[in-house]
Amino acid sequence: MTLPTWDQETDLLIVGSGAGGLLAAVVGASRGAKALVIEKTSEYGGTSATSGGGIWIPGSHLAAAAGHPDSPEEAFQYIRALSAQNVPDENIRAYVHRAPEMLRWVVENTPVRYQSLPYPDYHAELPGGRVGYRTHLPLEMDGRLLGDDVLTLRAASPAASLFNRINWRFSETYQLMFRMKGWQLTLLKMLTRYYLDVGQRLRSRKDRFLSLGTALVGGLRVALNQSGTELWLNSPLMELVREGPRVVGAVVRHEGKSLRIRTRAIILATGGFDRNPEMRQKHVPHLPDPSRSGGQEGNTGDGIMAALAVGAATMNMRHTWSAPVLSIPGEYRGRLSTTERALPGCIIVNQAGRRYMNEAASYHIAGQAMVAADRPEARTNPSWMVFDARYRRKYPLGPVLPLVPDWLLPRPVRSILYKAPDIASLARRLSLPADVLQATVLRFNEGARLGRDEEFARGAAAYDRLYGDPSVTPNPTLGPIEHPPFYAFPIYAGDIGTCGGMVTDEHARVLDANGHWVEGLYAVGNNAASVMGGSYPGAGSTLGPSMTFAYVAALDATGSTAA
């Protein structure tokens, strides 16, 4: 038998260039391995770059240094109660023990810097939950360190940037959203920072002030370059090559040619299948529309399908990182709605004109509620976010910016922003029963004036109040809807990615249906069935496991137990 020929050889082949893929390559290179990263699209960074860059890390050295020590036992208890029962204890324990180790390694060996924040867990009231210092956000970074690579760094999402082009710090977002003292100066500084970067403005609209997800990915790319590791763009994975029990290589399309690459190990970090309509229809038929996902266009399940072809098993494929999203005509992806729902002076109603959830809950819980409450007689997809003139004047709602007159909003936004002089007229514009919507608003207003939500306890949990208006008392999430004109904007059940995928063990090794390792194959991020098992413990619960198990996989693939 003639043995196949190989066009190239490497020690580690990493498929996908989000935070997990880049970190795996950097860690592998630090252990002496020759690594290669391949990315199917023309830009690197994946959904990681478009995100807030937050990671949920219990027990970090940064939290301890800030005076907030944590314990892996409490973190395990918290995740175990929330995660799906088919997620093994060993995987959860591996996460809570290895995540702090990963974070320390990143800040000591790459330009990425993180800070621990007083950001509450999404279910802080549960045993093991915390009201802060498990969520970590990256500090900003000078994109000039990337040289020309800043041009192919995927830009931040519209929800994580100003005017869909200017990167901002989390603190700047908060200051501008509530127009706190000095907000005009902050805005001026941001505009100056962006537009006075003349050299960059002449060649690209991309901001070289990197923050949030772009700072995370940018810092990892700098470390990748320093390690001498190659990153190929426009180079999709075509198939994995298995010989006996082991995956020994892959076929990759690169520069118009199909190349056979031999490798000791492959780490799949290609994201989920959020942009694949056929896979969505099969596994998440309740959310079939890819345009309502916040995931990237490259997230079409390539890694999952390639792994299935060589015998991998999958798990929890019905799970998504659920979220309410704003769907703007002409935009290919949904805009995550995080803060808008928690601000006083708004409610979300179904197509029968009734509230059906706590609008200020975490986006995962709110997204799940939109699906669970959907009924033929009271559809929730889309639902309507109803608010008044005071809300419109004070707060942003996605692309509906305060202080910008309605007539100056972009035409696609104006086309889905409904306005009326009274609630009954607004209901008729939305084809809702006017008497029901009037009664819904009246009931909400009665409680809001007293700072109470008798129906859904909005503002009772610590997380609810995080995005409320601190100037509003006694409940920062509640305010009556009473100032005409009145507005409505559609909001949809969506997601920021799928989180079901390959079955993996505590080393991120891909397993087959019999629980045996498909040797040489690893999966991290949304390629793997999440250790969170369909739950969302806190901000950073997607990137935290992705980076942790990428770190673990790279060590295991290079025969190391610690870096």
Image (spheres, rainbow, N blue to C red):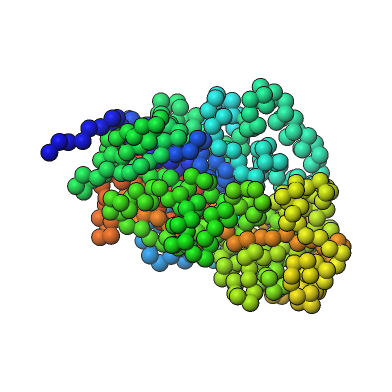
> What x and y, as percent, mark residue 84?
43, 65
For this orientation, the residue located farthest to the top is: 199
In the figure, 155 relative to 82: above or below? above
Query: Could you tell me which quadrant the C terminus lies in?
Result: top left
What residue is at 22 percent from the left and 32 percent from the top?
A: 5
For this orientation, the residue located farthest to the left is: 1
Q: Decide if residue 31 is in sight here.
A: no
> What x and y, as percent, mark residue 58?
50, 52
What residue is at 48 percent from the left and 48 percent from the top?
A: 299
> What x and y, as percent, mark residue 155?
59, 38
State how many labels appear: 0
In the figure, 473 relative to 254: above or below? below
Depth check: 293 or 141 in front?
293
In the figure, 380 relative to 115: above or below? below
> What x and y, as percent, mark residue 154?
55, 37
The quarter of the displayed image where residue 190 is located: top right
The quarter of the displayed image where residue 449 is located: bottom right
Query: Could you tell me which quadrant the N terminus lies in?
Result: top left
For this orientation, the residue located farthest to the front is: 256
What residue is at 34 percent from the left and 34 percent from the top?
A: 258
In the displayed structure image, the side of residue 5 where residue 303 appears, left or right: right
Depth check: 119 or 211 in front?
211
What residue is at 27 percent from the left and 43 percent from the top?
A: 241
In the displayed structure image, the side of residue 458 where residue 52 appears, left or right: left
